[in-house]
Image: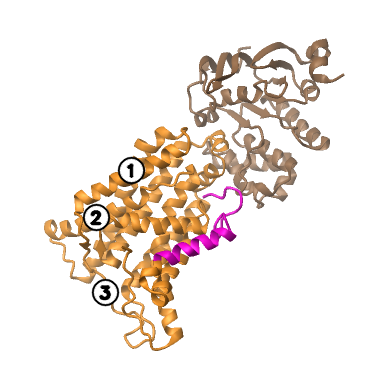
Amino acid sequence: MTPPLLVAAVDTSSGWQTFLQYALIGLTNGALFALVALGYTMVYGIIELINFAHGDVFMLGSFLALALIGAMAKYLGWNWGEPAMIGLGIGLLLVVVPLFCAALNVTIDRVVYKPLRRAPKLAPLVSAIGVSFVLMNVGLLWGGAADRHFPDLVSRQSVLGETAALSFTVKDLMVVAITVPIMIALTLFVKTTRLGKAMRATAQDPLAAQLMGINVDRVIGATFALGGALAGAAAVIYGLYINTVSYQMGFQNGLYAFTAAVLGGIGNIPGAVLGGLVIGLARSLGSGYVGERWTSALVFVILIAILVFRPAGLLGSRTRDKV
Amino acid sequence: MPALLEMQEFYAGYGPIEVLKGISIEVRPGEIVALIGANGAGKTSTLMGISGCLRPRRGRVLWESQEIQQLPAHEIVRRGICHSPEGRKIFPRLTVLENLQMGAFSRRDRAGIERDLVHAFELFPILAERRTQAGGTLSGGEQQMLSVARALMGRPKLLLLDEPSLGLAPMIVVKIFDVVRKLNQEGMAILLVEQAARMALKLAHRGYVMEIGQITMVDKAAALLTDKRVQDAYLGE
């Protein structure tokens, strides 16, 4: 089972139009993958751990968003039918859910990974897989085994007008309008702020970072927080965009996002974004031209092909290239 | 005068291997102290022990009469001990300027940092020319200068220098040693680890000789330079 793609509205009348439509859908989906991929890549960049639990943090975030939407309607009388309230409500979700995911991610690091910081690399890796299963079961307990419907709060009206050759809905626009600023903000943060520079320094040489007076434990904590927050934002957008959530979505999307991170060059922030977009495109074009059932195979064929020619990923350097 | 830094009976190691077997060293204010010895004697580990990157199994480190051996490394920097480590450890994908800013990470006095940056560029003009270049693209000598300059940005009372001459052209080594002398004349205490024993002892006030995890000799640098055993083992007469 793979996350559904929104390809229903594709007009097949003209070749290039169809292609552009698939590409547009692919890029929109890819922006979402990129947001999740950033969490994998940043954590890997700083402690060389593939945080397999990251996808499940994302999943729990979407469950929280779903629960909050219900609770706000029930206890606050929130009117999810009115555009202004929808906008404000989504804004609130985009604050609360990322905070939750950040706290969860930091807690996982403190409780599970931190005691293993000096252990051989395999130990935290296997623990990460374990945490992933634990969280997945928490999700199962919380949301049940069946797919859950996530309220369809954002309009599917095309912003280009109904008669335009291409369809780009308000929903698509929402994804782009939230993910792109987040990614720009993240890039600026890592490039220019004191903490961002400390993150890059720690990723490049943790020992030297310590000798500079950088509290490496704090920097690692901040990285988990940031990665978790990005997953939380992605969780809200995913729910609103795909409208179906399930306890398995963390595993599936996590796999794609992780693949995106590797594809772009794990540890590399622009790489994760590029990888996400490539995978989004591959899935969309693949399901359009090859067939939905081949999508996953296609994605991994592309991954393998790219890694054969560029083992460090698209933007990765041959040495360790990290945050 | 009381010692600035006192390492007392310091034992430390990695796993089952004990690399420091009761090291006692002191550095007094205004002093250049050379720590010489063969490869693998434990010189680098000694500096790591002072910096808080290698924890003692026994023993203490006193800084201005206070125990610091249990403090995390970033706290030790804050107290005025800055370290230019073995292998320079430049951040390869940060620019020269960013590397220097990292050196001042523990400080909050913007104006002071700006002044020290100017000072660092005066000491090593080549770094000013390279300020927007990534650290990893510098030559070995430039990286060594950057490593020293970066440590200075923490405004140390004690500067730990690990093999600043390693692999560098003699002209650059002379230049770096000149800077060390100048810093010392301005009042900075320096603990210098070197395999280039003659140069180190000529620069230093006092010296320690280290052999497989232990201090075997300690004396005025001038006395060590003329000592027969030191000459035979380290000065290659």
Residue A140 drawn at (x, y percent):
22, 51
**Mark 2 to mark 1 CA distance (whole Å):** 17 Å
Read off the magenta span: A296-323
Left or right, A127 with respect to B103, comes to left
Q: Which residue is mark 3?
A: A155
Classify residue A180 by image quadrant: bottom left
Left or right of A287 in this view: A240: left
Q: Residue at x 81, y 22 (%)?
A: B198
Letter of the chain that mark 1 sits on in the rendering: A
Query: Which structural element holds mark 1?
Result: helix
- Residue position for label 1: A131
- The residue lying toward the viewer, choosing from A272 and A288, is A288
Residue A1 higher or lower than B4, as above or below: below
Q: How many marks?
A: 3
Q: Amino acid at mark 3?
A: Ser
Q: Is residue A311 magenta?
A: yes
Q: Which residue is mark 2?
A: A63
The x, y position of residue A13, in whole percent, is 39, 89
> Which amino acid type is shown beneath numbered disc 2?
Phe
